Structures are given as structure tokens and as C-alpha cells.
Image (spheres, helix red, strand yellow):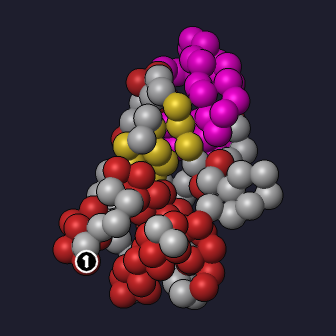
Amino acid sequence: MSVVSLRVNGKTHEVDIDPTTPLLYVLRNDLGLQGPRFGCGLGQCGSCTVIVDGVATRSCITPASRAGGEITTLEGLAKDGQLDPLQQAWIDEQVPQCGYCQNGQILTARALLDRNPNPTDAEIREGMEGVLCRCMTYFRIQAAIKRAAREAGE
Ligand code: FES
Ligand code: FES
């Protein structure tokens, strides 16, 4: 065991863990952040995604001891009681069905819009590739990303 320092949603946390513990387990079990979901545990579905230093990162295959940057989880998107524009667009487009994948969808989309505020349809498909949804909400996800981009540009 060793003490690992994690910066999550603007706060610093010290956790005493086996340094190989996946970041996902530390976020959920030690820090009580239930936004990131366990799906495959193999880096293949995207439901566990968080943003680390601006990059959408699969927390199930990222050792907590290597997540040294600024980590943002779904809980950290809203600011001062205001939803992130993407979260609002998700509501307006009624994106989720069962909801299980949506953490990964929203955080991957946030990282995409942060590096490309006005993506084309093709860039959205490319940026969201590999974040799997068994409920096939892909068209509504695309509509919500375009709505958030449009409204941010107004
Ligand atoms: S749970 Fe991490 S990619 Fe599937
Ligand atoms: S909304 Fe059900 S898996 Fe995506």
C-alpha cells in the first residue's frame, strides 16, 4: 500500500491504496464518485471514462497511481449549480435510454468539444468512436453534441 494523491474535480485527495488499483475503483469506492461506471473492465466499452488533463481516459485500465493530472468526473461538470451545456443538451435531446453508458458518452463528448468546439458529423463520429451504447442512442448523442456546440457558439 502507498499513499497516492489525486486531484479530482478541483479537490486534492490522499488515498492509501495498492498503486496498481484501477482509477475507477478508487473514484467509486474510496471517493464515492458513482458517475464513472464499470462496464467491461477491459478498456473496450468506455462507460468508465473520466477526463484526465483534457483527455478522455478509460479509468478501468488506468492505475490510480498514474493518474497524476487534473481529473474530471461527471460530478465535476456542473459549475456553481449550472449544468454543463452538454448536460443540458442531453436533457433537451432526451438522449439516455437505460443510461448505463451515458457517463462515458458525456465525458468523451466534453473532451471532444474542448479540443474542437464545432465538430462536423464525421468528427463527432470519429471522436465518439468506441464508446458503446447497447441501447443505440447514437443519433441522439450526435444531436446533443451538435446542439451544445451550436448553443455555445451563439
Ligand atoms: S469499463 Fe472501462 S472501458 Fe469498459
Ligand atoms: S443508454 Fe443504455 S447502454 Fe447506452
User: In the figure, is residue 8 to the left or right of 144?
Assistant: right
The secondary structure type at the circle numbered 1 is helix
Task: Residue type at mark 1: give it.
Answer: Asp
| Residue hosting label 1 | 121
- Spot occupied by residue 65 in the image (x, y as percentages of width and height): 47, 22
The image quarter in which residue 137 lies: bottom left
Number of marks in picture: 1
Q: Which is more toward the observer, 99 or 78?
A: 78
Q: Does residue 64 lie above or below 114 as drawn? A: above
Q: Position of residue 118 (x, y in %)?
A: 34, 66
Tell me which residue sits at (54%, 82%) in the image: 96
In percent of width and height, residue 116 lies at 32, 57
Asked whether 10 falls inside the magenta stretch, the response is: yes
Residue at x-position 74% and y-position 61%: 82
Q: Going by the image, does 50 lie left or right of 138?
A: right
Residue plotted at (48% across, 48% down)? 50
* Highlighted magenta segment, given as a residue range: 1-29
Residue that protrudes farthest toward the front in the picture = 154
